[in-house]
């Protein structure tokens, strides 16, 4: 069976320090091949997430 040539969408989980310089982080994810799929998922760092009280 042949391999599927379709690139997979990658998921990235940067730390707050990595996320601060977003342009540099974009260069990093491109170096990991994220641009091949034309889309990447970047999950924001845990310390940036809003917490809501119910």
Image: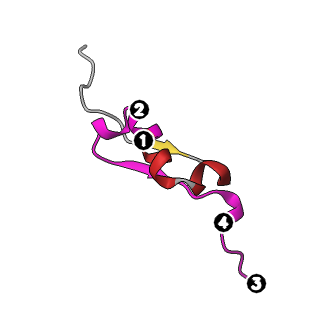
How far apart are labels 4 and 2 at the CA level? 25 Å
Q: Is residue 37 left or right of residue 9?
A: left
**Could you tell which of marks 3 and 4 lies nearer the N-terminus?**
4
Q: Badge 1 local density, few (<14 within 10 Å), some, or many (20+)?
A: few
Q: Is residue 53 visible?
A: yes
Span colored in magenta: 28-54
Q: Is residue 18 above or below residue 3?
A: below
Q: Which residue is mark 4?
A: 48
Question: Could you say whether the residue bearing mark 3 is in a helix, strand or loop?
Answer: loop
Q: Is residue 53 magenta?
A: yes
Q: Which residue is mark 1?
A: 27
Question: Could you say whether the residue bearing mark 2 is in a helix, strand or loop?
Answer: helix
Q: Which residue is mark 2?
A: 31
Question: Could you say whether the residue bearing mark 1 is in a helix, strand or loop?
Answer: helix
How far apart are labels 3 and 2 at the CA level? 39 Å
Please report contact status of discs 1 and 2: CB closer than 8 Å, yes or no: yes
Point 31% across, 40% down: residue: 35
Model colouring:
secondary structure
The C terminus - image quarter:
bottom right
How far apart are labels 4 and 1 at the CA level? 21 Å
How far apart are labels 3 and 4 at the CA level? 16 Å
Q: Is residue 39 left or right of residue 53?
A: left
Q: Which mark is residue 7?
A: none
**Could you tell which of marks 4 and 1 lies nearer the N-terminus?**
1
């Amino acid at each position: 069976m042949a391999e599927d040539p379709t690139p997979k969408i990658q998921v990235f989980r940067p730390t707050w320090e990595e996320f601060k310089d977003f342009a540099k982080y974009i260069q990093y994810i491109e170096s990991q091949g994220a641009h091949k799929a034309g889309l990447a998922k970047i999950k924001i760092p845990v310390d940036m997430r809003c917490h809501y009280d119910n």
